[in-house]
Image: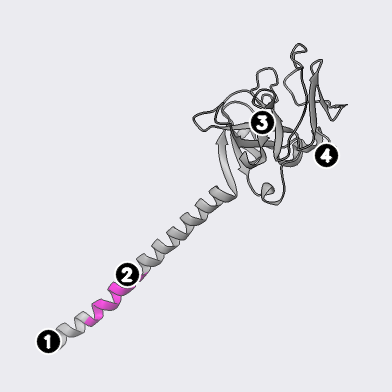
């Protein structure tokens, strides 16, 4: 009996250590999953470009890294390329769209003779996919409070604020920071786009 008791006492620490190690591994995995989910939900997301409305800046099938952090500290800026929840009447399946921010609350947008005017001033647009069709004027229209005006860089085929109207700032998911796939198309987007449009007050 004494021999059996000694064997039992020797087995228990081994079993306890094994369970403790398994529990620590499970706890570590759970924390890692929670951190990954938190990063995905609140900080960064990945998207695949579906369509050609942002050509030549973004191409169909490219993978994007979306940064949510900047808009926790302030609203989008003119020139930012953003992902947002499309209005339900235009995207009943709950799609997310990618466009460029052109106007902020209080800005007046006009397209005249195929050219963009922001608050009455002509804005050169070297980033768009060719001149806009002159026979499709727009505005002038002033962006309401709480909204922004967005347009696709492939202007002549883009479904954007010229048709769907300004979008709510609250619908913005994040700013496009990187094109990371395919590798040959890698490029930093982020704040590099802001210089295309004037910043500051109208």
Q: Distance between the residues labelled 1 and 2?
A: 26 Å
Q: Earlier in the sequence, mark 1 or mark 2?
A: 1
Q: Are marks 1 and 4 in contact (CB under 8 Å)?
A: no
Q: Earlier in the sequence, mark 3 or mark 2?
A: 2
Instruction: Kindly tell me whether residue 172 is visible in this rendering.
Output: no
Label 4 sits on a secondary structure element that is loop
In this rendering, position of residue 190 left or right of residue 5: right
Compared with residue 9, is residue 78 higher up or lower down, i.e. above or below? above
Within 10 Å of disc 4 (Cα), the crowding (few <14, some 14-19, many 20+) is few
Tell us which disc is closer to us: 4 or 2: 4
Front residue of 167 and 190: 167
Q: Distance between the residues labelled 1 and 4?
A: 86 Å
In this rendering, position of residue 11 left or right of residue 165: left
Within 10 Å of disc 3 (Cα), the crowding (few <14, some 14-19, many 20+) is many
Name the image quarter holding the N terminus. Answer: bottom left
Q: Which residue lies furthest to the left in this view?
A: 1
Q: How far apart are marks 3 and 2 (CA)?
A: 54 Å
Residue 57 at x, y = what percent? 69, 28
Residue 125 at x, y = what percent? 80, 25
Q: In the rendered image, which residue does mark 2 sit on?
A: 18
Compared with residue 108, is residue 32 higher up or lower down, i.e. above or below? below
Residue occupying the point 49% across, 30% down: 93
Instruction: Kindly tell me whether residue 7 is visible in this rendering.
Output: yes
Q: Distance between the residues labelled 3 and 4?
A: 18 Å
Chain part drawn in magenta? 9-20
Disc ID at residue 1: 1
Q: In the rendered image, which residue does mark 3 sit on?
A: 99
Q: How far apart are marks 3 and 1 (CA)?
A: 79 Å
């Amino acid at each position: 009996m004494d021999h059996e008791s000694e064997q039992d006492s020797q087995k228990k620490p081994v079993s306890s250590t094994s369970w403790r190690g398994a529990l620590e591994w499970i706890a570590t995995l759970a924390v890692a999953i929670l951190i990954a989910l938190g990063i995905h939900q609140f900080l960064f997301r990945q998207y695949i470009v579906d369509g050609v409305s942002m050509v030549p800046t973004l191409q169909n099938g490219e993978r994007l890294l979306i940064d949510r952090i900047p808009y926790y500290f302030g609203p989008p800026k003119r020139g930012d390329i953003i992902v947002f929840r499309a209005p339900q009447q235009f995207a009943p399946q709950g799609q997310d769209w990618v466009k460029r921010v052109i106007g902020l609350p209080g800005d007046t947008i006009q397209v005249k003779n195929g050219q963009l005017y922001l608050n009455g001033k002509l804005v050169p647009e070297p980033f768009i996919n060719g001149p806009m069709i002159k026979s499709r004027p727009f505005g002038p229209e002033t962006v309401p409070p709480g909204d922004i005006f967005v347009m696709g860089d492939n202007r002549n085929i883009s479904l954007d604020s010229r048709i769907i109207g300004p979008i709510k700032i609250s619908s913005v998911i994040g700013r496009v920071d990187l094109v990371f796939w395919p590798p040959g198309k890698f490029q930093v987007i982020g704040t590099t786009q802001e210089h295309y449009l004037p910043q500051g007050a109208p």
